[in-house]
Each structure stands twice: as structure tokens, then as C-alpha cells.
Image (cartoon, rainbow, N blue to C red):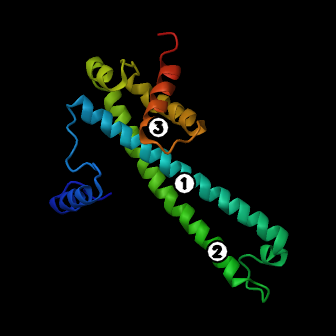
Amino acid sequence: MSNLFDSENRRVIETLNAGLGTKHRTKPYNLNSPDDLKHALTMAVGAYRDYYHYKRELLGVAEDLDESLEHYDTITWINQGSESDNADIEAEECVDAVEVAISAFDKIESRAKVHFVKTLAMILSASPELQRAVFGRPYYVSEGNMEAEIEKLIETLDESEYHRSIPKNFELLMEIMADEWAKGK
């Protein structure tokens, strides 16, 4: 991931913001600021959820394409990857393009997940006061158990309805954290 806040990128983002009326971030996060940490987590969960969703959509396209080839172009479906005279180059290129896209999205989804996990773990390791400012309450997740607990949280997040809204993804995360981690506390 490129450094978003070097002087050239900052200038480009400021020009974009001025031209489009957007408010894309142009400065690094202050890790001592609850507002910055909340914003960082909001963006991290949003990025992860978006890339996870897009990859799942592409996996669905691959499955649908395979079924279409099986039903409508059976010989093409049977001969996929073969050197047969019956090979359908255009269909093979289509299948290959979807596979390349899935691979690319898998990489950015994985990168976004790592960033999301690190951001969440950093906040969970912070003081109860800082957690309260970000989450609305502190959570007591032990360092030794944190990775497994976050992974369970992500599994629940992955099974939840997808929202294109960045704030709704953050709200969903807060709901899941409260449901999963506030039990019996």
C-alpha cells in the first residue's frame, strides 16, 4: 500500500477534495486521538467489508459462468484447459479473466483484513478510557486470546448482511462486538 500522506499524494487528494467537494483524509492518523482511531477503524472495517464482498461476488460470477458453460457450451466446458481442437479460446479467456480478478481481489481483501485486525487489536490493547471513546465502552480481551477472538468476530461479520455504507459497517462491527464480547460481563 502506498504512503497516502506523502506530499505528492496529499496535493493530489487536496485537489480532488476541492474539485469534487469530498473530504478524503490528507494527514496521518494521530494514534493518541480517539477521533482519529475511530476514523481509522471505521475506514479499516469498511475497506475489509467492501473487498470481501467484491471477492464473494466474483466467486459467484465464476460459479455462474461454469454452470452456463456446462449447460450452453458443454463441449467448451468439457474441454476447458485442454489443447483440443474443440477449445473455445474466447470462453477460456473469459474464465481466465475471472480467475485473475478473483486472485487480485483475494490479495487486496487479505491486505485489508490484516490492516483491520491490526487497527482493532491496537485499540483493544489501549486504555479503557480510550476504548470507551472509540467503542462506547471498554472490552477486556486478553492479549493471548485476542487473535482468536478477533477471528471469531470477523467470521460473524462475514456472515452478516453487507452494507455499502461506511458508517453502517462500523455500526455493525460495534453491534457484533457488543453481542459477542459483552455477554456475561
Q: Which mark, by number, is residue 94?
A: 2
Determine the image quadrant of residue 74. Answer: bottom right
Q: Is residue 41 visible?
A: yes
Q: Cβ–Cβ below 8 Å for labels 2 and 3?
A: no
Work out whether mark 3 precedes mark 1 in sequence or the reverse, and give the earlier one: 1
- In the structure shown, which secondary structural element does the residue marked by tag 2 occupy? helix
Q: What crowding class fits label 3: few (fewer than 14 Cα within 10 Å), some (14-19), or many (20 or more)?
A: many
- The crowding category of the residue bearing disc 2, from other C-alpha atoms within 10 Å (few below 14, some 14 to 19, many at least 20), is few
Residue beneath the point at 46% across and 36% down: 168
Indicate the secondary structure of the residue bearing disc 1. helix
Residue 71, horizontal then vertical, whole percent? 84, 68
Q: Is residue 128 above or below residue 113?
A: above
Label 1, label 2: how far apart the Cα atoms are: 18 Å
Residue 113, visible in the rendered structure: no
Instruction: Tell me which corner region of the image, top left, top right, bottom left or bottom right, holds residue 89.
Output: bottom right
Question: What residue is rendered at 25% in x and 48% in y?
Answer: 25
Place of residue 40 in the rendered image (x, y in percent of width and height, measured from the top left): 31, 39
The residue shown at (78%, 63%) is 67
- The numbered mark, 2 or 3, whose residue comes first in the sequence reads 2
Q: Is residue 26 above or below residue 79?
A: above
Q: Which residue is mark 1?
A: 54
Type of the residue with mark 1: Tyr
The percent coordinates of residue 162 (x first, y second) are 56, 42
Residue placed under numbered mark 3 in the picture: 169
Q: Position of residue 147 (x, y in %)?
A: 45, 33
Q: Is residue 88 left or right of residue 72?
A: left
Three-letter amino acid code of the residue under disc 2 = Cys
Front one among 48 and 81 = 48
As measured in the structure, the alpha-carbon distance from the residue carrying label 2 to the one carrying label 3 is: 33 Å
